Image (spheres, grey):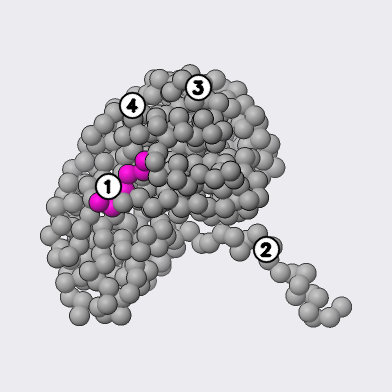
Amino acid sequence: MSSTVQVAQLAIAERMSTISVSSTMKVAADADKMRREGIDVVDFGAGEPDFPTPDNIKQAAYDAIKNNFTKYTPAGGTQELKAAICERHKADYGTNYTPAETVISVGGKHVIFNAMQAVINPGDEVIIPVPYWVTYKDVVNFAYGKCVFVETEETNGFRLTAEMIEKAITPKTKMVIVNSPSNPSGAVLPNDEFIKIFELTSSRGIWLLTDECYCRFLYDSEPFSIAAQPGAKDSVIVAGSLSKTYAMTGWRIGFALAPVAVVNAMMKLQSHSTSNPTSIAQKAAVEAVRGPQEGVGVMLEEYRKRRDFVIDRVRQIPGVTLQVPQGAFYVYPDISVAFGKGGINNTMQFCEKLLAEAHVAAVPGEAFGTDKHIRISYATSMHELERGLDRLHKFITGLA
């Protein structure tokens, strides 16, 4: 056998070229590498709460281990957790889902990946507002769908409208993704506009995937789910996660609420990939959604204080502008004032130089589909925010 044939047989599958390395994960890895080398890094890249998982949730996991709840569960999650998720979602948002319309997955990202594989055929178009969470583009590409990006306006707080979506709809449109509150911008879609989007997609026979990862972290409005609208259960797919709400990022529990056919398709795929979510984490998740909820409010108020501090501090940097985030725990400032200085011409170069010289980790806007912004997470201590923003200020003003 010739060496050419051998190389061809050992080549990586072509489908892997449709996805990229997660920019947020790369930033985290680069910052961690520098820390292990003894460098003092301030990390604004991490998209996870700095709060510990509440003690009652951890105790539920200890009890699960003690009681030998350490075996396989059904691939789509335990009946107990499915019922608990339905109860929590009804209490928070007024929905009326059943366990048959619920699947438990290994985190919210897994939910979105499985949902995309379940409903998107090659060539189907998926409308994605910009800026977008990094994974949306890649999971659509991996399903051989086509991303159709809808640009939002920074001057309007990056808010999406039904009119924007309607202009992007074609006969090939299969799904619209809405993430409110948004990662990375913190924008929150007004309820009336969200309803208009749902009325538009449902009337056109288009799936509406609502990513509710940050839905409990709203600063100026009450929690809202489009899935509570009459008739929404027929065409809405809810992607939910316990990671941010209960400071359970490492536990890897997410959930989908969707029509039974979609749920069954997702479970079929899951049964041949990850199988069930971790049994112990599922017991902890039951306690999270059925137990005391006061901790969510405590985190929200702390995030509010940090948000206000960050907004004030960033606006003191000459030439840097930003919109006030209405939810989540990120700010998304425009740092294009730095372009043309110090060899910086884009946000990727900005973030690389910021990390190398100022030892501050942030995520470049290119990862989210924009070319002038960086994402700063304020899910870290006030001390770290002060240190990091001082460094950012000095870095930008020191560019020549």
Q: Which tag, 2 or 3, sits closer to the chain's start?
A: 2
Q: Which residue is mark 4?
A: 293
Name the residue rendered at 45%, 45% in the picture. 167
In the rendered structure, which segment of residues is drawn in magenta?
Answer: 154-161
Given residues 231 and 35, the one toward you in this image is 231
Q: Which tag, 3 or 1, sits closer to the chain's start?
A: 1
Q: What whole-number distance in Å separates the C-alpha atoms at marks 1 and 2?
A: 38 Å
SS at badge 2: helix
From the top left corner, tell me how far across and down residue 39 is, in percent.
31, 70
Callout 4: 10 Å neighbours few (<14), some, many (20+)?
few
Callout 3 amino acid? Gly
Name the residue rendered at 62%, 32% in the picture. 262
State the image quarter where residue 272 is shown.
Answer: top right
Callout 1: 10 Å neighbours few (<14), some, many (20+)?
some
Q: Main secondary structure of the magenta part?
A: loop
Given residues 298 and 265, the one toward you in this image is 265
From the top left corner, tell me how far across and down residue 340 is, in percent.
27, 77
Callout 2 amino acid? Glu
